[in-house]
Image (spheres, rainbow, N blue to C red):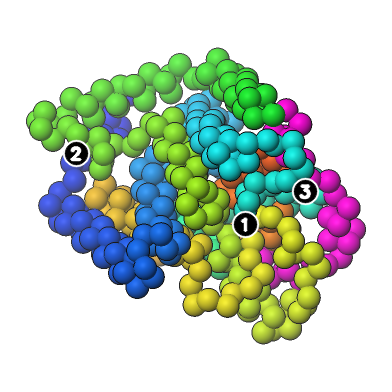
């Protein structure tokens, strides 16, 4: 690695102006949380807790670059396992946290009851259709919905178009829901793995599968990439005075993927315990339904949707829901973190970025609606909860990514 590349890659120490801007945003978020708590009777209120969890989630996503598509792309293209290990760490730590909560709330999983509010979906063909569309949307737009949200805080030129496209996709998903429900969802079974395996068996099987997925990622990792990453980490650790090293590690250097994943899993378990499972699409879907209904695109009755579990909303009777507060605080925390690290870099989007953002966003929104959640809600929170639907959506999502990338390579060769 050349000295010039090392100089560009080395994290710079946060300056006073950047830290001041980030601190101002952090104080504002704290004041909002306190105001919500006072207005609604304390921190037992869901809005205040949603703001706190959204802030923590946005910070962790931005600092660890936690992104489902980026992790898969880095592994497929460069044999870089850091992102994959972060995703697997998030699955493992969240599953352990959920197991503790389930054991207290529902000691016997074989009663036929499901844990309250957990994202345990049915094994319908819509999971496959939604996962394929969502995976293709990620490959086209460059990120999943949660990553577009935190990159919105970084000034991403693509994220606003992707989120706009997602609103259109959600509306199209609602418009197509009734025939899909009748054809695929109404008779589909719901498989909750702890009911079949018990909590110890489910947790052991989950951790074994995660370890089996981590092994090839570590075994086939690129030695060159690992050496470069370790060298940059050493440069970051040695730079600056000893008193400033912790500041650099938190606000300037990228967090290791496994550390970000552990935090994501822990936030997911605590959020489920106190507010709701992690998810970023409920508010988007609610607003899309409002707009689609007003335009006459979405039917007034959506068959069976209110009885199904997932990160999707069919009503928007509040000015701002818990999920809306969660998402807005996620973006604000990402902005504060990006300002502190010098990673807030807005620029004018190119036409290709706008087009890919909108097209990918439409597929992201449609896929998330028919699958009742995205890579955070259906996949992450679903696997945390022991839902077989989470694994099914994840497999379809990866297939969508691989198929779209293969089609793009064929088109490029043909041209």
Which residue is labeled 3 in the image?
Answer: 122
Residue 219 among magenta residues: no
Q: Is residue 215 above or below residue 232?
A: above
Q: Residue at x 42, y 38 (%)?
A: 263
The residue stretch that appears in magenta: 169-197
Q: Is residue 60 above or below residue 334?
A: above
Q: Earlier in the sequence, mark 2 or mark 1?
A: 2
Locate the N terminus and report the quarter of the image it occupies: top left
Q: CA distance from mark 2 to mark 1?
A: 36 Å
SS label for mark 1: loop
Can you tell which of label 2 and label 1 is closer to the viewer? Answer: 1
Residue 185 among magenta residues: yes
Q: Residues within 10 Å of mark 2 (few under 14, many from 20)?
A: some
Q: Residue at x 77, y 48 (%)?
A: 122
Q: Pick whichever, 370 or 229, lies toward us.
A: 370
Q: Earlier in the sequence, mark 1 or mark 3?
A: 3
Percent of width and height locating residue 404: 70, 45
User: On residue 246, which mark appears?
Assistant: none
Which residue is labeled 2 in the image?
Answer: 247
Which residue is labeled 1 in the image?
Answer: 311
Q: Residue at x 67, y 24 (%)?
A: 201
């Amino acid at each position: 690695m050349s000295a010039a590349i090392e100089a560009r890659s080395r994290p710079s120490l946060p300056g006073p102006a950047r830290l001041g801007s980030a601190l101002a945003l952090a104080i504002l978020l704290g004041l909002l949380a306190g105001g919500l708590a006072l207005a609604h009777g304390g921190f037992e209120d869901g809005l205040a807790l949603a703001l706190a969890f959204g802030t923590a989630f946005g910070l962790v996503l931005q600092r660890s670059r936690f992104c489902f598509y980026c992790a898969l792309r880095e592994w497929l293209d460069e044999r870089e396992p850091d992102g994959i290990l972060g995703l697997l760490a998030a699955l493992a730590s969240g599953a352990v946290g959920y197991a503790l909560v389930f054991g207290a709330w529902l000691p016997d999983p074989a009663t036929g009851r499901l844990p309250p509010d957990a994202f345990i979906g049915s094994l319908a063909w819509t999971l496959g259709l939604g996962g394929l569309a969502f995976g293709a949307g990620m490959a086209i737009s460059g990120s999943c919905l949660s990553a577009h949200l935190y990159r919105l805080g970084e000034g991403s030129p693509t994220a606003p178009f992707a989120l706009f496209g997602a609103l259109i996709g959600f509306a199209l998903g609602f418009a197509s829901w009734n025939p899909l429900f009748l054809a695929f969802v109404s008779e589909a079974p719901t498989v909750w793995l702890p009911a079949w395996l018990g909590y110890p068996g489910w947790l052991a099987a989950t951790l074994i599968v995660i370890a089996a997925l981590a092994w090839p990622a570590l075994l086939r990792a690129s030695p060159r990439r690992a050496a470069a990453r370790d060298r940059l980490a050493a440069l970051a650790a040695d730079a600056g005075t000893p008193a400033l090293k912790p500041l650099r590690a938190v606000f300037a250097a990228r967090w290791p993927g496994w550390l970000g994943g552990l935090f994501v899993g822990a936030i997911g378990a605590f959020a489920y315990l106190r507010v709701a499972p992690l998810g970023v699409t409920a508010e988007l879907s609610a607003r899309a339904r409002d707009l689609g209904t007003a335009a006459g695109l979405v039917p007034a009755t959506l068959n069976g949707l209110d009885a199904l579990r997932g990160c999707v909303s069919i009503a928007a009777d509040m000015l701002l829901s818990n999920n809306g507060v969660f998402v807005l605080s996620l973006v604000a925390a990402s902005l504060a973190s990006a300002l502190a690290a010098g990673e807030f870099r807005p620029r004018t989007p190119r036409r290709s970025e706008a087009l890919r953002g909108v097209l990918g966003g439409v597929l992201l929104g449609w896929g998330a609606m028919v699958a009742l959640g995205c890579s955070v809600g259906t996949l992450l929170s679903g696997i945390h909860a022991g839902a077989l639907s989470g694994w099914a959506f994840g497999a379809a999502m990866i297939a969508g990514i691989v198929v779209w990338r293969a089609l793009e390579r064929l088109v490029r060769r043909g041209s």
